[in-house]
Every structure is written in C-alpha cells, then in structure tokens.
Amino acid sequence: MLIADDDAVVRNVVRRYLERDGMDVSVADDGTEALRLLGSTRVDVAVLDVMMPGPDGLALCRSLRRAGDFSVPVILLTALGEEDDRIAGLEAGADDYLTKPFSPRELALRVRSVLRRSPAPLGALPLEITVDALTVSTAARTVYIDGVPVGLTNREFDLLLFLITHTDTVFTREELLQRVWRWDFGDLSTVTVHVKRLRSKLGAQHRIQTVWGRGYLWRGNDADRDEARAGAAD
C-alpha cells in the first residue's frame, strides 16, 4: 500500500502499524512523490492526505479516475470534518475517507475493507449477468454497456453486484453499509454518493430506484411491466 502525507509522524506511525499487520508499505511526503510511486510501483491501495503539498489527495484521486484507473482503491485522510468536504472526496472517486485524528487500527480496518472483494461468494453467482445492454462479469469484475467498458471503482462494482443480485428488494442505507461496505457504523452519505456515481456511470442502463423514506432497490423486469400497466391504465 501507499501512504502519502506531509506529516512525518502520521507516515511513520501508520507505516509501522500496517507493516506489523503484514502489509508492504511505501511512503511519500508530498503529492509529487506519491504520483511517481503510483506510476512506478504496484499499489493495491492508496491512502492520500487531502492537504499535502504538490498534487493533493483530491487532485491525485481525480487524476487516477480520469485516466481510467479504477483498480486502485483510494482512502483519503482529511483534517476537515464537514459533510461537504467528505462528499467532495467521495465524488472525486475515493472509496473511503478518514478524518484526522484517527487510530492506525481504524485505518487498517478501512484498508482491509476496501481490499475485500465481492459481497457474495462467487460460487453462488453466475459468471455473467446481463440486463438489457448491461453486462456484468462477476469473476473478472468488469462491466460493459453495449460492449463498451464502464470504469467502476471496487466499491462501485460491489454495490452494483449486490443490488443487481437482489432485484426488487429495498435496502436502507444502513443495510447497504453493513452488507456491501461491511461496516456496522459510518457516514450514510457514503452510500448516497456511491449510488449517485453509479447512476451517472450506468446512464440509461441503471435500474436503481429510490424508495422514499426507505432506501434503494434495483428494479427488475416485473417492476417494468407493472409500470407499463400503470401507464396504460392512466
């Protein structure tokens, strides 16, 4: 993993803790060094400070996503605790964030969480799921619309896979945090922003319906027919 922060104490404490946890850790003290490491070494997860010199964590995250790199989960570290700031990080393409001060143990738990794959055992899923022009490969963790690849982060893919395999079932944001993120608590805006990003990337192929006051569901074909009947009756 990569930890990029201009605070030497944060870098060293986090590095020592995560190395004891069995991880191979590279460190950077600014955005320029982080960018070099991202381009020259294998990084399975990047932990980026939002306010470090050079390209900051937000800029690096946006750069990765705009370049089409959705394979590296990003956790942002921020001293800003306002909801707008947290949402800005998630909308930049981050998978998660932590507000300073934080415990190394919590960071380690978040790292393991973003590295965890599929919210359901692959053996229980078909190798490929097709809904209209949307094709989801469960093993390769790829998504196509009319044969064109759609770049999703690991968390976006997990959310899509969970919803599409639980058609017409409403889940609250708390339930999605528990079953997709595997968190027993957390900021519910994390779910809201990921749903927004997923809808945007899937465009007309998304079937994510907001059930006001309850949560979200992936609308199935039966629901489509019910809507068509309702429209005809009107």
Image (tube, grey):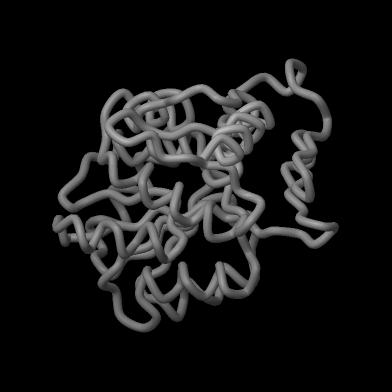
Q: Quick one: 163 or 85, which is closer to the camera? A: 163
Q: Quick one: 86 or 4, which is closer to the camera? A: 86
Q: Quadrant of the rendered structure where residue 56 is? A: bottom left
Q: Is residue 173 left or right of residue 155?
A: left
Q: Is residue 74 above or below residue 129?
A: below
- x 32%, y 48%: residue: 14
Q: Quick one: 102 or 59, which is closer to the camera? A: 59
Q: Residue furthest front?
A: 233
Q: Is residue 62 above or below residue 219?
A: below
Q: Is residue 37 visible?
A: no
Residue 223: x and y, percent?
Answer: 60, 30
- x 47%, y 35%: residue: 112
- x 16%, y 61%: residue: 80
Q: Is residue 166 left or right of residue 55?
A: right
Residue 75: x and y, percent?
Answer: 40, 53
Q: Quick one: 107 or 161, which is closer to the camera? A: 161
Q: Is residue 172 left or right of residue 26?
A: left
Q: Is residue 111 visible?
A: yes
Residue 234: x and y, percent?
Answer: 51, 40
Q: Quadrant of the rendered structure where residue 79 is? A: bottom left
Q: Quadrant of the rendered structure where residue 86 is? A: bottom left
Figure label count = 0
Q: Residue furthest top?
A: 124
- x 60%, y 59%: residue: 203
Q: Is residue 181 above or below residue 194?
A: above
Residue 160: x and y, percent?
Answer: 59, 40
